[in-house]
Amino acid sequence: MPETNFERLVLLLGLCAIAALGYLVARGDRHHPRPSAASTAVSTPAAATTRADTTVTSTSTEQRQSTRPAPIARLVLAATRGDCWVVVRSRSARGRVVFAGTITRGTRRRFAGARLWLRFGAAGNLTGRLDGATIALPPGSPTILATAAGIRVLALR
């Protein structure tokens, strides 16, 4: 331990200098972020059009700009010819389960989302409308992806 007032003052000033340097280093990293994988991945025009929900970070202006959100698909499934078991997930086959159950004859279910992943037990028993337009569901037990642009058959069983 320092014995004189002068030694105590030097120690205190040294500790303050170390704290100030630590603060400046931490503050400097926040104001000059390193490019991340997300910001470099969307730097090309082709990559920017593939992800609608990507946030682009500008390292020079420190402002965040969001691209347009993906349009919402509005899907109505009606059991007109019989019952049909259905699983609806948000975004993908591993997404959040929106609905899992049977749509019984004479009933309908409404779903909305940017990407709806659906698996059917007997799709031939259903009629579908996507954003007001009638869609043809493949017979059997298909797996489809519904977006505002239309449906895409992923698997037939």
Image (spheres, grey):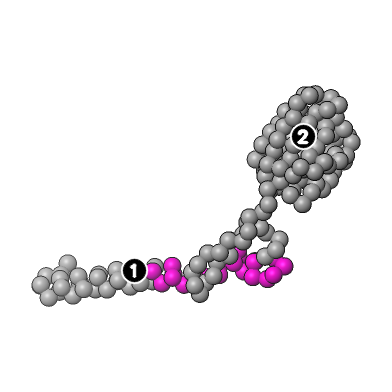
Inspect the magenta stretch and tell me whether residue 44 lies in it.
Answer: yes
Q: Residue at x 58, y 61 (%)?
A: 66
Between 51 and 14, the residue placed more toward the observer is 51
Q: Residue at x 66, y 58 (%)?
A: 52
Is 145 rendered above or below residue 141?
below
Q: Please name the residue that numbered disc 2 is placed on.
A: 77
Q: Residue at x 71, y 61 (%)?
A: 50
Main SS class of the magenta portion in the image = helix
Q: Please name the residue that numbered disc 1 is placed on.
A: 23
Q: Which residues are magenta?
A: 27-47
Q: Is residue 5 left or right of residue 35?
A: left
Inspect the magenta stretch and tell me whether residue 17 lies in it.
Answer: no
Q: Quadrant of residue 143?
A: top right
Is 94 rendered above or below residue 33?
above
- Identify the element where label 1 is drawn: helix
- Identify the element where label 2 is drawn: strand
